[in-house]
Image: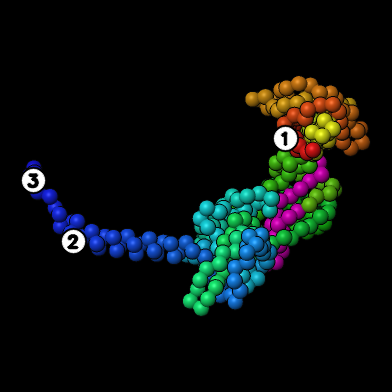
Amino acid sequence: MITSNKKYNFINNVLKPALIMTCLFVLTSVTAMAQAPCTPVNIAPPTDPALLVFEVEGKIQSFNNTTRTITANGMTIFIPTTVLVETRNLDLTGNITFANLTDATLEAQRSIIGGTVIASGDIVFSQGTSGNCVSMNATRVFVEFAENVVVGLLSDVDATAGTFRVNGSPVRMNTDARFPKDILDVGSNQLTIAELASHAGEDITVNGYYDAAQNVMFATLVETEFVKALPGQDGVAITRTEGRTGNRELRVEGQNARNPQGQFAASVTVFSGGLDAAGTQCVGTQLGTAAVSSIDGVWSFRQRNITPPAQVCVKSPFGGIDASAVTITN
């Protein structure tokens, strides 16, 4: 091995300026790609910050992967790398990157162009070549293929084929990984198509997008009116919680499923706290009981002079159990 104490100063003297220029070029290019398009306007920035916000809901006309933009209603919005796009529920805050949303393989199968975007964010003023211009920098973005809804009677459940009908209209669950495919009971517990079979003739709501070529409604969310029963047991679903700090009151409402013998439990027991590690017992202090309707399984619990707990758990003597966070109000 050859060693030397010679210092290679030519790197500093000759290459350093070139390296600096290269870095500046790369930085400028990256910055340019990360900036939102700026649309010329003939107004000055408002002095009230409350006016520097935007909202848009409309049909997606186009998108651009390089500039990270979506155009809808003739307006182009910029989606920063720090913002995730939401595809599950408008009230949630983001679950998918813009790159995954616009994945080329999935777009070739079904494009978001023609779908709906609901976005909000900041209006940013800049100086363009001909004066002031504005950019729409999104802070929240929700995208869906469509907002098609069918409400009616469930029939023709075929778990093997993965199909069912609502009001005679054929339904399949969504297969696009960018969007949800949830079937929920009245307490927002997950169900399978097979578990729908015993509820034919009951009311059901399907949200999703209709494919005219296949004459099929692809469901992203199916909401039922029944409670999922546990194997060999009944079922419990908490449908509403409210803890009022002003008058120190707790309200819990829910619904039970029948047990395999076709019976509703006479009552349920309410606890302050959640589930144990196994998810089979309630932990915490027992607060009381609520009578269960023998007609539809609905029950309601109310207690006053109590500091509302952060969570409640409800247990049926037939084995059904559910827990939920408490919505705290004044």
The reply to whether residue 11 is in sight is: yes
Q: CA distance from mark 2 to mark 1?
A: 65 Å
Q: Residues within 10 Å of mark 1 (few under 14, many from 20)?
A: some
The circle drawn on residue 325 is 1
x and y percent of residue 284 in the render?
A: 73, 22
x and y percent of residue 87 in the render?
A: 63, 54
Q: From which residue to which does the magenta span run? A: 206-230
Kind of residue at disc 2: Val
261 with respect to 174 (left or right): right
Look at the numbered disc 1 and give the secondary structure of its residue: strand
Name the residue rendered at 59%, 56% in the picture.
Answer: 139
Name the residue rendered at 72%, 39% in the picture.
Answer: 189
Quarter of the image that includes the C terminus: top right
x and y percent of residue 192 in the render?
A: 70, 43
The circle drawn on residue 4 is 3
The circle drawn on residue 101 is none
The reply to whether residue 119 is in sight is: no
Q: Quadrant of residue 144?
A: bottom right
Look at the numbered disc 2 and give the secondary structure of its residue: helix
Q: Quadrant of residue 212?
A: bottom right
